[in-house]
Image: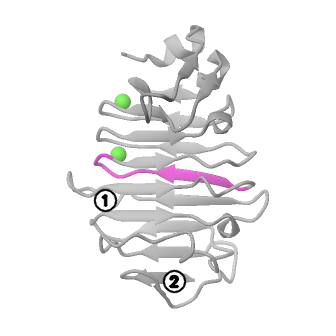
Amino acid sequence: MTAHILRQATLISSRGTNTSDTLSITGSGTAITSLDMTDVTLFEKIVVANNKDVTLTLNDANVADGKTMSIDASKMTSSTSNLVLDLSNETNGDIDVIGGSSADTITISSSDLAASIDAGAGNDKIVFASANLTSIDVIDGGAGTDTLQANNETAIVDADFTNVTNVEVLSSNAADNAVIATIGAEAMAQGFAQ
Ligand SMILES: [Ca+2]
Ligand SMILES: [Ca+2]
């Protein structure tokens, strides 16, 4: 079954009914909040159906413990359509993301399972809180000058970069947030430019 969020959050159905349910989001530029997503359960996939800006914050309820959901924004092919996707509320599901062609901002989940982020083209920003980036997380910045940005004070060990590729910049979201990173073989292998 395919359900649609039209405009902001007029939801036709909030529950998937089988094992391959898709929630289709039509971007309007209006943010879809974690509160809007509260009752969305049992979907295996979210797709962005059009080519406009989408701001989406997931709710922890959207992916059940140990389950997997994919988010596909590959239809966002315009150089001016930006995806702002916040997965940080997710604590125990596996979310696989395909970004759009433009400059996406994707905040990784706090899940104990691996994140998989394929940011695609554009100068993307992948945001993380201290403990949420580990060696099991697979992050591919893709084309463009992409940034891995810490949103709190954090220490990152070299192994955290094991599955990070095509990301050019490591940064912090504020001048007073120190990021202490150990740049060893794994970080060198993925190729930070600055
Ligand atoms: Ca992108
Ligand atoms: Ca890149």
Q: Secondary structure at mark 2?
A: strand
Q: Is residue 102 magenta?
A: yes
Q: Residue furthest front?
A: 176
**Whether the residue under disc 2 has CB within 8 Å of ligand 1:** no
Q: Secondary structure at mark 1?
A: loop
* 175 sits to left or right of 122: right
Query: Over which residues does the magenta segment extend?
Result: 93-103
- The quarter holding residue 42 reads bottom right
* 16 sits to left or right of 187: right
- On residue 140, which mark appears? none
- Callouts 2 and 1 close, C-beta under 8 Å: no
**Crowd around label 1: few <14 · some 14–19 · many ≥20 (10 Å):** many
x 75%, y 54%: residue: 92
x 42%, y 18%: residue: 192
Please tell me whether residue 166 is drawn above or below residue 76 in the rendered image: above
Name the residue type under label 1. Met
| Residue 64 percent coordinates (x, y) | 75, 65
| Residue 137 percent coordinates (x, y) | 63, 36
Residue that mark 2 sits on? 3
Please tell me whether residue 114 is drawn above or below residue 78 in the rendered image: above
Please tell me whether residue 56 is drawn above or below residue 7 in the rendered image: above
Quadrant, the N terminus: bottom right
Residue that mark 1 sits on? 76
Mark 2 → mark 1, Cα distance in angstroms: 19 Å
| Residue 39 percent coordinates (x, y) | 64, 80
